[in-house]
Amino acid sequence: MVVTSRTSPGQVRSALLAGALGFVPKSASALGLAAVVRAVHGGARHVDSALAAEAIAAGESPLTPREADVLALSADGAPIATVARRAVLTPGTARNYLSKITTKLKVANRHEAAQLARRHGWI
């Protein structure tokens, strides 16, 4: 069971895929949290309804796993040469991946792409 202050749709999805049976924000009341703990202990699954709705609304990532990797490796604003080295790619290939990602996500640059992907939990 996950009790967290971080509640992005991607974190909910990742936790559930990793086998968590419950996902609750830290803002849950003590009574609510106790009820969830009892339910999960009894074998039930529980995800806060607002978090579940956000996770569903965010949808699946449009990025391939490799595109998500390259974007994550560039998310700190590193120069293309550094991103390429991290991803074990040539600088031209890294640039091509980032160009394809920005087009796919309909954003102006890789920095906006990283922000969008983080917000949706894709990276």
Image (cartoon, rainbow, N blue to C red):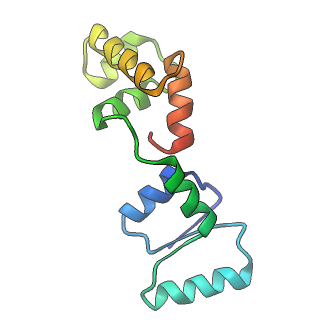
Q: Position of residue 82 (x, y in %)?
A: 39, 15
| x 68%, y 81%: residue | 32
In the picture, the quarter occupied by the C terminus is: top left
Q: Position of residue 75 (x, y in %)?
A: 49, 27
| x 33%, y 19%: residue | 97
Please tell me whether residue 57 is drawn above or below residue 51 in the rendered image.
Answer: above
92, 81: nearer the viewer: 92
Q: Residue farthest to the top? A: 92
Q: How many marks?
A: 0
Please tell me whether residue 35 is drawn above or below residue 65 in the rendered image.
Answer: below
Corner quadrant of residue 71: top left
Q: Locate residue 40 relative to residue 69 in the image: left or right.
A: right
| x 52%, y 21%: residue | 107
Q: Position of residue 93 (x, y in %)?
A: 27, 13
Corner quadrant of residue 103: top left
| x 57%, y 60%: residue | 53
Please tell me whether residue 57 is drawn above or below residue 70 in the rendered image.
Answer: below
Q: Position of residue 76 (x, y in %)?
A: 52, 25
